[in-house]
Image (cartoon, helix red, strand yellow):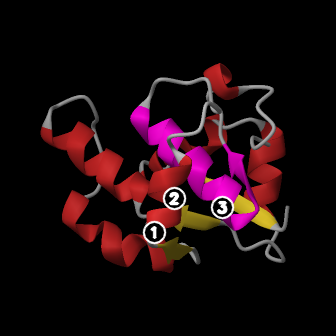
Amino acid sequence: MSGYLLDTNILIALINQTQNRLPRRIRELLADTALKPVVSVVSPWEISIKSATGKLKLDEDVNALGALIPAYGFSLLPMTIDHALEVAHPEPATRDPFDRLLLAVCACEGLKLLTTDTHLAGHRLVY
């Protein structure tokens, strides 16, 4: 594994400026300027859907995500056909389509998912 992919929940914490509530190990990784975590286009997609349906309160305009992600120093990974096809494999065991996509990106790109989602704890692709 050569890097980290931010889970949507981490990106939301940064946008809403609640990163102080994240576990210390994650805050330390985010503070390490030598690491360059990436964000998958899956996360803005998830944020956009959840914001539009009222399931998520975001402190920034969703339309600003395209500028916010690089402003935080993260690069944005596009979704590829390989990512889409990786979702069909039996792993991960989660039924959440966004988690499946993010884990598929990790599998294809050699990344670890940086998340606080306890449902994903212990997964081989999760930090």
Q: Earlier in the sequence, mark 3 or mark 1?
A: 1
Q: Are marks 3 and 2 in contact (CB under 8 Å)?
A: yes
For the residue marked with disc 2, what is the amino acid? His
Q: Quadrant of residue 55?
A: top left
Residue 100 magenta: yes
Secondary structure category for the residue under label 1: loop
Q: Quadrant of residue 29?
A: bottom right
20 relative to 82, above or below:
above
Q: Are marks 1 and 2 in contact (CB under 8 Å)?
A: yes
Label of residue 80 in the image? 1
Residue located 81% across and 26% down the image:
122
Local crowd size for mark 2, using a 10 Å CA cut-off: few (<14), some (14–19), many (≥20): many
Residue located 25% across and 38% down the image:
50
Distance CA(mark 1)–CA(mark 2)? 5 Å
Along the viewing direction, whichever of 82 and 104 lies nearer the viewer: 82
Q: Quadrant of the N terminus?
A: bottom right
Secondary structure category for the residue under label 3: helix
For the residue marked with disc 1, what is the amino acid? Thr
For the residue marked with disc 3, what is the amino acid? Cys
Residue located 14% across and 42% down the image:
52
Residue located 22% across and 43% down the image:
49
Secondary structure category for the residue under label 2: helix
Location of residue 54 in the rendering, given as x and y in whole percent from the top left corner = 17, 31
Q: Are marks 3 and 1 in contact (CB under 8 Å)?
A: yes
Location of residue 93 in the rendering, given as x and y in whole percent from the top left corner = 61, 23
Q: Quadrant of the C terminus?
A: top right
Distance CA(mark 3)–CA(mark 1)? 10 Å
Location of residue 16 in the rendering, given as x and y in whole percent from the top left corner = 42, 48
Residue bearing the label numbered 2: 83
Residue 59 makes an appearance in the image: no
Label of residue 108 in the image? 3
Residue 83 makes an appearance in the image: yes
